[in-house]
Amino acid sequence: MLQQSALPSYLQSDRLGPWGIYLQQVDRVAPYLGKLSRWIETLKRPKKSLIVDIPVELDDGTIAHFEGYRIQHNTSRGPGKGGVRFHQDVTLSEVMALAAWMSIKNAAVNLPYGGAKGGVRVNPHMLSRKEIERITRRYTSEINAAIGPNSDIPAPDVNTNEQVMAWMMDTYSMNQGHTVMGAVTGKPVALGGSLGRREATGRGIFVVGCEAARRKGIDIAAGARIAIQGFGNVGSVAARLFSEAGAKVIAIQDHTGTLYQPTGLDTAKLLMHAAQHGGIAGFEGVQTLNSEEFWRLETDLLIPAALEEQITEKNAPHIRTRIIVEAANGPTTPTADDILNANGILVIPDVIANAGGVTVSYFEWVQDFSSFFWTETEINRRLEQIMCEAFAAIWQMAQEHRVSVRTAAYIVACTRILMAREMRGLYP
Ligand SMILES: NC(=O)c1ccc[n+]([C@@H]2O[C@H](COP(=O)([O-])OP(=O)(O)OC[C@H]3O[C@@H](n4cnc5c(N)ncnc54)[C@H](O)[C@@H]3O)[C@@H](O)[C@H]2O)c1
């Protein structure tokens, strides 16, 4: 029988990085896939991996080269969909894992997309606006053949924003010879972007957090205690919505420090302070904690909304919360996940919790195709409906199989992907 390596030759088994975490998650779901597990190898390798060189002239006249990636992990259920990250530490393994998590997320929420992701190894904070524009345009040109409204639709991720998406849409359109609004999502509203997109991920966290709290008998409106790591786009919107609903956001941590106020922080004032000072440090009238103390606070909901691999075997045993809602991608390592489960902490995984962003990106794509734009109220209503239905189906799966919500989300998602794979068959 033909012996096949489970790993593509371009990865080293002792340095798998985030892709290794993803492979472990897929292995955990395999026993629940029945006959579909015959197709599981399709999930363990990306469909298409593009590595490009991005040469640009810097403002001082020197020529610099940057490494860029676009990965399409799976397109069985529709075009690839996923963000573009600009970061000096981006690796192939990381982009592969992020693309795979997009496949799982889109299938878990039942959006008609596969999974994709892109990245450029660059620290944009060291570059001028013009230099970032040149990198964005050259990167888009280099991946031009792989992307498009029917094949793979990029969106913002870490260190990319509406402006970067506007440049991407313009570059793609110039190469096509006409404007293609639906080539990327997360664009400015004036260029075919969607109302509500900027707040969508934080809003989705709020919706799913409330659904999970209700099932655990926690009353958000009666002052449920919440701690949030990360006060950026996602963390700050979630903090505001939970505060407005009557919860007490008792602690917030960002890269500048940790604030604690047992009666609840004034999140609106804190947002103004963070916008002025570049972080939450220096906000007056509240206590400060060191970063380890943050993870030991007694809370009802804990929301990691910053970076990957924040909850590890080191801090997981000390966490005293009832529910963790993963707003960041991949914030919990598999070992930490086991510790949390053993301690009876309910973990709502990233692939469902933070799917609000891609859901409104889907609305943006649909609106661009039809050139008919919805009101913000309509968008928020549809977002809530999709998130609640997806969460309910996954919750029911978790109860039926007596598995974690993460495993249940993977069962739902992998079943949908592999069923599509099987029904389509192999070409040629
Ligand atoms: N923005 C979206 O639509 C979206 C969608 C899905 C998932 N996510 C994920 O959510 C997370 C946050 O994204 P965002 O858009 O809010 O990013 P952001 O850059 O706006 O905010 C990141 C926040 O994390 C904080 N942070 C950074 N390093 C930290 C550290 N060492 N300790 C504590 N805090 C730290 C920063 O201070 C900042 O408050 C990321 O993992 C991202 O992949 C974002």
Image (spheres, rainbow, N blue to C red):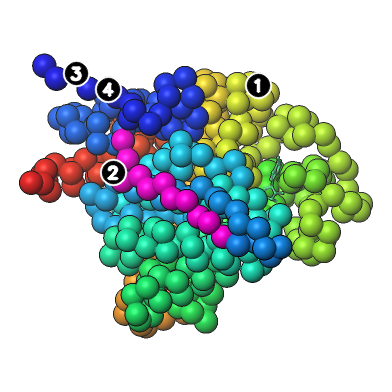
> Mark 1 touching mark 4, by CB under 8 A?
no
Amino acid type of the residue that numbered disc 1 sits on in the rendered structure: Lys
**What's the CA distance linking mark 1 and mark 4?**
33 Å
The one nearer the camera, 130 or 65, is 65
Q: On the image, numbered disc 2 is attached to which residue?
A: 47
Q: Is residue 270 left or right of residue 85?
A: right
Question: Mark 2 or mark 1, which is nearer to you?
Answer: 2
Image x and y of residue 173, in percent: 39, 75
| Amino acid, disc 3 | Gln
Q: Residue furthest right?
A: 285
> Residue 267 location, x and y as percent?
75, 58
The residue at the point 44 percent across, 62 percent down is 140
Residue 56 is left or right of residue 369, and the answer is right
Q: Tell me what residue is drawn at x 22 percent, y 22 percent.
A: 4
Choose the circle earlier in sequence order: 2 or 3: 3
Mark 2 and mark 3: span between their CA atoms? Answer: 20 Å
Counting residues from the start of the chain, the first of labels 2 and 1 encountered is 2
Q: Position of residue 330 (x, y in %)?
A: 52, 38
The Cα–Cα distance between marks 3 and 1, rounded to whole angstroms, is: 38 Å
- Does the magenta-highlighted stretch encompass residue 50? yes
Q: Is residue 295 above or below residue 56?
A: above
The residue that disc 4 covers is 5
Region rendered in magenta: 45-56
Give the mark toward the camera: 3 or 1: 3
Asked whether mark 2 and ligand 1 are closer than 8 Å, the reply comes as no
